[in-house]
Image (cartoon, rainbow, N blue to C red):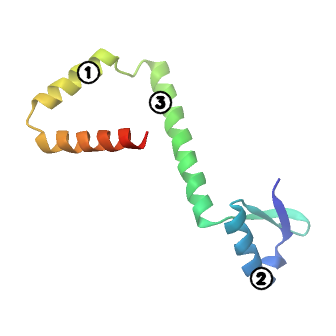
């Protein structure tokens, strides 16, 4: 449940509101004339929510692509990767290898 405060508190108690949204890591609803008017949240929470929305959008787009049959099979992807690796991409291969090794270390 969101914490609800009158919009006048934003002017009169800005420091307390800022501290609350940063510490609790949740949005706060400001009311005007007893009705919800604005949401206040920390930049960190806003960025997280924005990233979540982008992810959900990407997942929805991918789901549509799959439904339309716009995807590659595992063997097709493997063929494309093999073809790409056969080219002289030593720097890219080394970079991918380092990324893979780092990911395995964190597991």
Q: Name the residue: 42% across, 18% down.
A: 69
Q: Secondary structure at mark 2?
A: helix
Which is in the foreground here, disc 1 or disc 2?
A: 1
Q: Is residue 95 above or below residue 63?
A: below
Q: Give the CA separation, mark 1 to mark 3.
A: 20 Å
Which residue is labeled 1 in the image? Answer: 78
What residue is pinned by disc 3?
A: 62
Who comes first in sequence, dot 1 or dot 2?
2
Q: Residue at x 83, y 78 (%)?
A: 8
Write down the quadrant of residue 38 in the picture.
bottom right
Work out whether residue 84 or residue 6 is closer to the camera in this orientation and state it: 84
| First reached walking from the N terminus: tag 1 or tag 3 | 3
Residue 14: % across, % down: 74, 80
At horizontal 90% and vertical 69% (from top left) the residue drawn is 33
- Are the two marked residues, 2 and 3, in contact with CB atoms closer than 8 angstroms? no
Check the image and report above or below for 90 versus 3.
above
Circle 2 sits on which residue? 11
For residue 28, above or below residue 86? below
SS class, disc 3: helix
Q: CA distance from mark 2 to mark 3?
A: 44 Å
Of 38 and 27, nearer the camera is 27
Looking at the rendered structure, the secondary structure element under dot 1 is helix
Residue at image coords 34%, 20%: 72
């Amino acid at each position: 449940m969101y914490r609800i405060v009158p919009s006048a508190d934003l002017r009169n108690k800005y420091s307390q509101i800022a501290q609350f949204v940063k510490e609790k890591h949740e949005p706060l609803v400001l009311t005007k004339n007893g009705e919800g008017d604005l949401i206040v949240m920390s930049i960190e929470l806003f960025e997280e929510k924005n990233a979540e929305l982008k992810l959900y959008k990407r997942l929805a787009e991918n789901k549509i692509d799959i439904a339309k049959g716009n995807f590659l099979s595992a063997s097709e992807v493997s063929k494309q990767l093999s073809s790409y690796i056969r080219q002289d991409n030593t720097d890219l291969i080394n970079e991918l290898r380092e990324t893979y090794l780092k990911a395995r270390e964190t597991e």
